[in-house]
């Protein structure tokens, strides 16, 4: 089982996914200042002089001490994250496809000045992408089913892990953008 632990900064903003080893190290070094969720696993250590075995219970969400950076969040634009953002649905025909049959479509083509950015790309099936070609949706007489958006840190952490646990999902999804949803 490859369970990932959600790491937050002390302000409660998600930072990354941790392995069990990384989480155990943070707990042992007392760098975890608070935690949420149910324990996802136990790591058993050695036995001390009194015959007591050490046990680390790893929670599903940990907040760590350290500086809180106020940098702007700029998630990397990769097809695996884009397709997951759009739920493997072609935003032109509405069909759901396996990732092998999907492509990245630029709403405003790059040849027409469009950028390769989260707000200008959508998931498209190959058929719709070929039909739209080097045109805007209006020029191709095709309607977008949703407006492309930049995932916030909570959404991006969800997009980057295919095995999000229930309490992690509850924490992350409470902070998802509410204004953009598929029709």
Image (tube, rainbow, N blue to C red):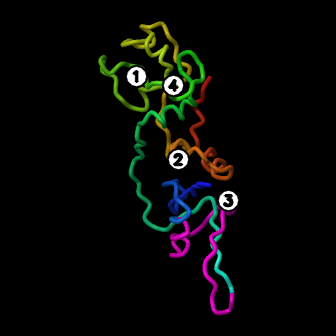
Disc 4/disc 1 C-alpha distance (Å): 12 Å
Give the mark nearer the N terminus: 4 vs 1: 1
Quadrant (top left, top right, bottom left, bottom right) of the C terminus: top right
Q: Which residue is mark 4?
A: 147
Quadrant (top left, top right, bottom left, bottom right) of the N terminus: bottom right
Disc 4 + disc 1, Cβ < 8 Å:
no
Q: Which residue is mark 2?
A: 157
Label 4: which secondary element: loop
Which stretch did the figure color magenta? 23-51
Q: Which residue is mark 1?
A: 106
Few, some or many residues within 10 Å of mark 2 (<14, 14–19, 20+): many
Disc 1 + disc 3, Cβ < 8 Å:
no
Disc 1/disc 3 C-alpha distance (Å): 39 Å
Q: Is residue 53 above or below residue 57?
A: below
- On the image, which quarter does residue 145 sit in? top right
Disc 2/disc 4 C-alpha distance (Å): 20 Å
Disc 1 + disc 2, Cβ < 8 Å:
no
- On the image, which quarter does residue 120 sit in? top left
Farthest residue to the bottom: give it. 49
- Closer to the eye: label 2 or 4: 2
Label 3: which secondary element: strand
Give the mark nearer the N terminus: 2 vs 4: 4
Q: Position of residue 129 (x, y in %)?
A: 45, 16
Give the mark nearer the N terminus: 1 vs 3: 3
Give the mark nearer the N terminus: 3 vs 4: 3
- On the image, which quarter does residue 146 sit in? top right
Q: Position of residue 65 (x, y in %)?
A: 49, 68
Disc 3 + disc 4, Cβ < 8 Å:
no
Residue ID at (62%, 64%): 35
Residue ID at (57%, 24%): 97
Q: Is residue 155 above or below residue 71?
A: above
């Amino acid at each position: 089982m490859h369970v990932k632990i959600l790491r937050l900064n002390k302000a409660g903003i998600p930072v990354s996914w941790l392995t069990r080893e990384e989480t155990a190290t943070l707990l042992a070094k007392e760098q975890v200042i608070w935690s949420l969720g149910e324990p996802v696993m136990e790591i058993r250590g050695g036995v001390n002089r009194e015959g007591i075995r050490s046990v680390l219970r790893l929670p599903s969400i940990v907040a760590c001490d350290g500086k809180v950076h106020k940098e702007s969040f700029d998630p990397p634009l990769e097809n695996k994250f884009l397709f997951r953002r759009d739920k493997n649905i072609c935003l032109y025909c509405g069909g759901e496809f396996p990732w092998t049959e999907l492509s990245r479509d630029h709403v405003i083509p790059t040849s027409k000045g469009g950028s390769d950015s989260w707000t200008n790309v959508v998931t498209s099936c190959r058929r719709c992408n070929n039909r739209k070609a080097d045109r805007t949706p209006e020029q191709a007489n095709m309607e977008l089913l949703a407006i492309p958006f930049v995932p916030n840190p909570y959404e991006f952490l969800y997009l980057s892990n295919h095995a999000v646990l229930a309490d992690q999902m509850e924490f992350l999804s409470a902070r998802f953008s509410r204004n953009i949803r598929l029709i």
